[in-house]
Image (tube, helix red, strand yellow):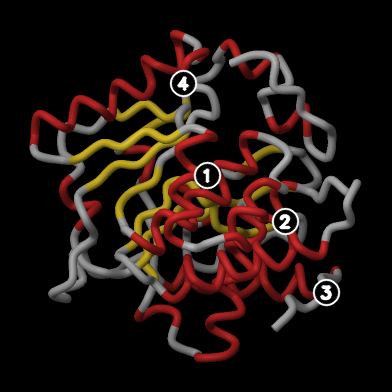
Amino acid sequence: MQPEPDSPEHHRQRSEFIRNLVQRQFVQEPLDDGLLQATPRTVVQFWHNQRQMPDDVKECIDSWVRWEAKGFKHRLFDECSAKVFIDHNFGVRHKQAFECCYHPAMQADYFRLCYLLVEGGLYVDADEVCISADIGCLFNGSRLKVQPLCYDIDSGTMVSPSVFLSVDAFDSSWIFYFNNNPLIACRGHPIIENALSRATILLELAGKNELPEIQATTGPGNLSKAIFEFDTILGCVESELLVLRDWDAFAISKWPLSYRSDARNWRLSNQQKFYRNGG
């Protein structure tokens, strides 16, 4: 089934749905949902070229590697190893879709969906620094755990969670959506399956020389649509999803980092060719 075409009305409906969902879950049960199936205690990350990884990115990743001493697994993939994983577990169609991801951030977006569907775990971006003394609760239960975000179009800035998560908080210029970082899921989660299916089809529909928008195709926009569609069709999304209201208590996005000033920063390379001549 092909994804429905987007429109301003679809954007509005999706944002309102997410607003109601995240504010309704503002007071909710603990991260452990009481179900027997737990998320594998594996932290998964991606950097497209491990041989040319900037030192400051490595420092971020090392903040997650340290959890191996506490019994967690840590797996770091690059473009080559991610392609091998996808080919082995999915086959030619998904490998070709991955090859259509023209920027490392897009590759990371697509790969995380593939990995989590097969193996489950906690995927976190390479620019996140773990600041928590305990991450074990993030792996409790089987629901998909996602971080809500809110963007103010008028000011061009992000709205603080302490503001937008309050019940009935609203402004007509706000856009609510779900980040795809972190992404915490058990194996075979149906929302991850839907998000991967959408991303694969969108990549296949793109013309040979087309560079589709990253967020909408493989990133937060795609995930938000997958969650919205899941609820529209089945009407039980809250049994499958848990809103992470306090992710910043576990990790922070380090800024600045050396790569943010060049083409490796997707915000500077969205819908532009990426030339793989550096780390």
| Image side of residue 192 versus residue 158, left or right | left
On the image, the x and y values in percent for residue 133 come to 16, 32
User: Residue pushed farthest bottom?
Assistant: 234
On the image, the x and y values in percent for residue 199 come to 65, 62
For label 4, the crowd category at 10 Å Cα-Cα, with few meaning under 14, some 14 to 19 and many 20 or more, is some
| Image side of residue 176 versus residue 5, left or right | left
For label 2, the crowd category at 10 Å Cα-Cα, with few meaning under 14, some 14 to 19 and many 20 or more, is some
Mark 3 → mark 2, Cα distance in angstroms: 11 Å
For label 3, the crowd category at 10 Å Cα-Cα, with few meaning under 14, some 14 to 19 and many 20 or more, is few
- Residue 35 tag number: none
Q: Which residue is mark 4?
A: 50
Amino acid at the residue labelled 4:
Gln
Looking at the image, residue 78 lies above or below residue 72: above
Q: Residue at x 71, y 76 (%)?
A: 13
* Mark 2 element type: helix
Q: Which residue is mark 1?
A: 83
Does residue 17 appear in this view?
A: yes
Mark 1 → mark 3, Cα distance in angstroms: 29 Å
- Residue 5 tag number: 3
Amino acid at the residue labelled 2:
Ala
On the image, the x and y values in percent for residue 158 come to 63, 41
Name the N-terminal-most of marks 3 and 2.
Answer: 3
Amino acid at the residue labelled 1:
Lys
Q: Residue at x 43, y 49 (%)?
A: 85
Does residue 163 appear in this view?
A: no
Q: Which residue is mark 2?
A: 216
Mark 1 → mark 4, Cα distance in angstroms: 14 Å
Mark 1 → mark 2, Cα distance in angstroms: 22 Å
The quarter holding residue 142 reads bottom left
